[in-house]
């Protein structure tokens, strides 16, 4: 099950951070998303180069979730949370192109994507999830909500407990009782409850079609071709603005 595969990966991320306190978000993203793709054949991860991230999107990877009737797409920026640290500087990270979070939100909105954060964590804090899920190290939060929460008030110390309280475990996206892949309405209910879009427009991130590069990725999988036989930078040349794709095909087989 996709649910169990993601829970397994998230547990391993939690354990890895606990054992190696200095591991960074780039390593966690590269290993974690590859790992979850190895655990379930319906999950695919392709990694690209990083040189475009700061300038164009602020995103580490593109997330696609396919159901039988709707598709969800998001641009995701990864952040490693550290116990006892003020995390405000990380969220307010700026380079010569401006605030990273602003780039993430702006670019995502242009393409109709949801802007999300992936928080990597090894502490058990209360999240938005109603269940007491512990020892999982991957949480997702809406970047717009994080932006409004942090920048709408004077600068203050932001700790990991605060950011996790605005998030849900990644496993919830597939294990929650609200989300049944055979009934797309339950997925929308999940989004409306935990990830309400700004200004009430919950169509953001929802689409009924996917681009050619997703079709190509699905074709590689269904034809059992080795992705190493392809020039990925050429095959997916439309993806200059992201560093990788995580594709979760949760349609009925």
Image: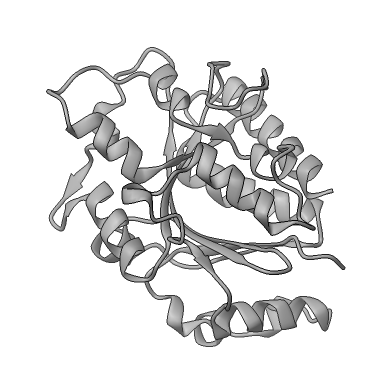
Residue located at (27% from left, 66% from top): 56
Write the residue at 66% across / 37% down: 172
Q: How is the image coloured?
A: one colour
In the displayed structure image, the side of residue 3 where residue 104 appears, left or right? left
- Image-quadrant location for residue 161: top left
Please name whichever residue, 158 or 122, is drawn nearer the observer in this view of the structure: 158
Comparing 240 with 212, the one in front is: 212
**Relative to 56, 112 lies left or right:** right
In the rendered image, the vertical position of residue 168 relative to residue 144, given as above or below? above
Please provide percent x and percent y for residue 231. 58, 85
Residue 130 quadrant: top right
Where 36 sits versus 50, above or below?
above
**Residue 31 visible to an observer of this rendering:** no
Q: Residue 14's x, y, as percent?
A: 63, 27
Q: How many marks?
A: 0
Residue that extends furthest to the top in the rendered view of this protein: 84
* Residue 37: x %, y % from top left: 72, 56
Q: Which residue is at 44% across, 44% downward?
A: 196
The one nearer the camera, 85 or 57, is: 57
Residue 66 in sight in this render: yes
In the rendered structure, the answer to whether residue 23 lies left or right of residue 145 reads: right
Tell me the quarter of the picture where residue 211 sits. bottom right
Quadrant of the rendering where the C terminus is positioned: bottom right
* Residue 22, position as x, y percentages in the image: 47, 28
Residue at x-position 24% and y-position 30%: 150
């Amino acid at each position: 099950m996709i649910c169990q595969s993601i829970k397994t990966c998230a547990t391993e991320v939690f354990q890895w951070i606990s054992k190696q306190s200095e591991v960074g978000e780039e390593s966690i993203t590269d290993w974690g998303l590859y790992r979850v793709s190895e655990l379930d054949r319906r999950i695919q991860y392709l990694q690209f180069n990083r040189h475009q991230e700061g300038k164009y999107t602020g995103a580490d990877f593109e997330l696609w979730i396919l159901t039988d009737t709707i598709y969800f797409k998001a641009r995701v920026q990864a952040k490693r949370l550290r116990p006892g640290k003020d995390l405000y500087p990380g969220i307010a990270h700026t380079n010569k192109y401006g605030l990273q979070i602003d780039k993430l939100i702006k670019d995502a909105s242009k393409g109709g994507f949801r802007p999300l954060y992936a928080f990597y964590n090894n502490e058990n804090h209360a999240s938005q999830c109603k269940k007491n899920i512990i020892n999982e190290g991957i949480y997702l939060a809406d970047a717009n909500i994080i932006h409004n929460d942090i920048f709408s008030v004077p600068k203050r110390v932001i700790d990991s407990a605060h950011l996790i309280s605005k998030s849900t475990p990644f496993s919830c996206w597939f294990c929650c009782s609200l989300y049944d892949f055979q009934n797309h309405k339950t997925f929308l209910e999940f989004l409306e409850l935990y990830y309400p879009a700004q200004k009430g427009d919950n169509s953001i991130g929802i689409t009924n079609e996917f681009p050619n590069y997703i079709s190509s990725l699905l074709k590689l999988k269904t034809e059992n071709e080795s992705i190493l036989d392809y020039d990925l930078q050429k095959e997916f040349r439309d993806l200059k603005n992201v560093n990788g794709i995580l594709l979760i095909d949760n349609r009925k087989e």
